[in-house]
Image: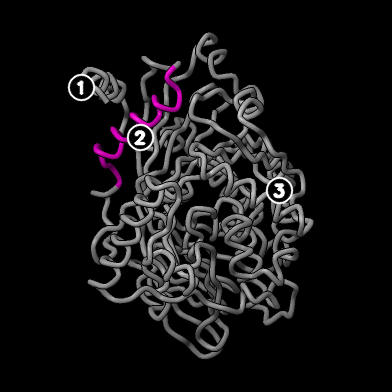
Amino acid sequence: MAPVAMRSVAKSLSEAKPVSYWLDDPGKPAPQPALTTDERCDLLVVGAGYSGLWTALLAKERDPQRDVVVIESKEAGWAASGRNGGFCAASLTHGLGNGLARWPGELAKLEELGARNLDAIEEAVARYGIDCDFERTGEIDVAIEPHQVEELRELYEEAQRLGLAGSSTWLDGDAVRAEVDSPTFLAGLWDRDGVAMLNPAKLAWGLKRACLDLGVRIYENTRGLKMASAGTGMTVQTPYGTILARRVALGTNIFPSLVKRIRPFTVPVYDYALMTEPLSGEQLAAIGWKRRQGLGDSANQFHYFRITPDHRILWGGYDAIYPYRGKLDSEYDHRPETYLKLAEHFFTAFPQLEGVKFSHAWGGAIDTCSRFSAFFGTAHSGKVAYAAGYTGLGVGATRFGADVMLDLLDGADTERTRLQMVRSKPMPFPPEPFAWTGITLTKWSLARADARGGHRNLWLRTLDRLGLGFDS
C-alpha cells in the first residue's frame, strides 16, 4: 500500500477507544459483592463467563432446589465472553470440516445436538427476556482466492452427499456480492439458519441476571485460589473465605485451571477486533448487507466481520498471537500493529468505505486446544467437572458444555456423555520452548499456504496426519 494510503489507514484509528465496544456500555450492571465469609452449597461454579453462567442457569432449571454459588475473579463477562465478535454458532466442532476430520461417525449426531443447542439458546433469550440483539441471520463463508472457491465448493458438495447441508446455499460471485458487496468476494456458502448474531456482553449480563433471579448466589471479584477434596465434597479457597461444595464445575477456560493436570491442553491465543463508527445511509447503500449475516473469509489466517443494529461493522481476526510460555497479561490486550493491519485489510475489502473511522479497538485471549473444539472431563473421583478449549466458537457451544458438565457431575449416561467427542481428549501442547516453536512454525506455514494457492507444506501435512494444527 502506498505511504499516503497507509497514512489514511492509520488516521482511521486515531479516535479508536482501546476497549471492547460491547463492554463500553453505560448499561453495564454493577458487580455483585465479593465473598467475605465461608460458604456451603450443592454446586460451586468457578467462572462467570458463558461457560459458568450457563452451568449455573441449567443447574437451577434441572433442579430448582439445588443450592448454586458462582465465583468470578473479576466481573461477569469481562473476558472472552464480552470481547468476541458476537457470532453464536450451532456448530460444536468448530465447523463442518473439522468435525468431518475428527468424528465422521458421529458428526450427524453432533450437528443435530448443535442445532438443538442453538434453538435452546434462542428460547432462553426469549424466556428470560435477555435484550442482547439476538438475530438468527446465518453466516456466509466467503472465498477471496480462487483456490478457496474450489475448497468451499468441495465442502458444500460433501455436506450435501452426507445429508448435512441443511439450509446452506451456494453463492457464486455475483450472488455473494448481491448480499454484501466487496470486490474481494469470489463465492460464498451461506448457512442460513445455523448462526445467530448477538451482543455478547449483553448476553452474559442477561444470563447473570437470570441466574440471580433463580436464586443463584454470585460473588464477583472473588478468585478461586486452591481446590481440595473434603470428604464427600470439595473445598475452594478464595481471598476472604472458603467454600464447601458437594460438586464443582470449572468454567475458567483459558485461565489456569484448578485441576492442574489439564493445563497443558490449552494455550492462550490473542485475537483482535475493530469496530467502526455508525455508517451513513449512503455508506450502507454502497455495501448492501441488508440481511445482516455474519461473514468470514476462507483463508487460514481469516477475518470475521458482522454488522450491528446501529450500523457499525465489526472487523476482527487474522492475527493470532501466542505469547511465549503462554503468558496471560493485559499487556497483550492491545496491539497497535495488528490494529493497523486489520484496518488496512478492512479498506481492501471495502474500498467504498474510505474515510470511515474506527471507534473501538481491542483484543483478548482465546482458549485454544489442538483439536479446535471443546474437551470435557472429571477430577477428584467425579466431584469436579470441567470444559475448556472452545477455540473461539464458545458463544454457542458453552451452553452444550454446561450440559455436559452437569451430566458428568450427576454420573448420568446421556446422548452427550456417550459421544466420542466428550469421552476423548485432544493432544496436550508440549512444554516450552517446543510449544512456542511449533506454534510459530505453524503460523508461518499457514500464512505461506494462503500466499501459495492453499498449498500445504510438509509441516502442515504432518500436523494434518497427526490430527493437530493451529487455527487463527
Q: Is residue 339 magenta?
A: yes
Q: Which mark is residue 304?
A: none
Determine the residue located farthest toward the right in the rendered image: 163
Q: Is residue 171 magenta?
A: no
**Spatial distance from mark 1 to mark 3, Cα to Cα?**
50 Å
Q: Residue 134 at x, y = what percent?
A: 65, 37
Q: Measured along the vertical axis of the image, is residue 441 above or below residue 264?
A: above
Query: Is the magenta region chiefly helix, strand or loop?
Result: helix
- Range of residues picked out in magenta: 333-351
Q: Measured along the vertical axis of the image, is residue 74 above or below residue 25?
A: below
**In contact (CB < 8 Å): disc 2 and disc 3:** no
Q: Nearer the viewer, mark 1 or mark 3?
A: 1
Q: Residue 378 at x, y = what percent?
A: 54, 80
Which residue shows up at 62% across the image and 33% down it? 293
For disc 1, the marked residue is 3
Q: Nearer the viewer, mark 1 or mark 2?
A: 1
- The amino acid at mark 2 is Leu
- The amino acid at mark 1 is Pro
Which residue shows up at 74% across the image and 44% down it? 127
State the SS at label 1.
Answer: helix
Please state if 23 lies on the left or on the right of 67 as rendered: left
- The amino acid at mark 3 is Ala
For disc 3, the marked residue is 124
State the SS at label 3.
Answer: helix
Which residue shows up at 30% across the image and 62% down it? 441
Determine the residue located farthest toward the top in the rendered image: 282
For disc 2, the marked residue is 342
Identify the colour scheme used: one colour
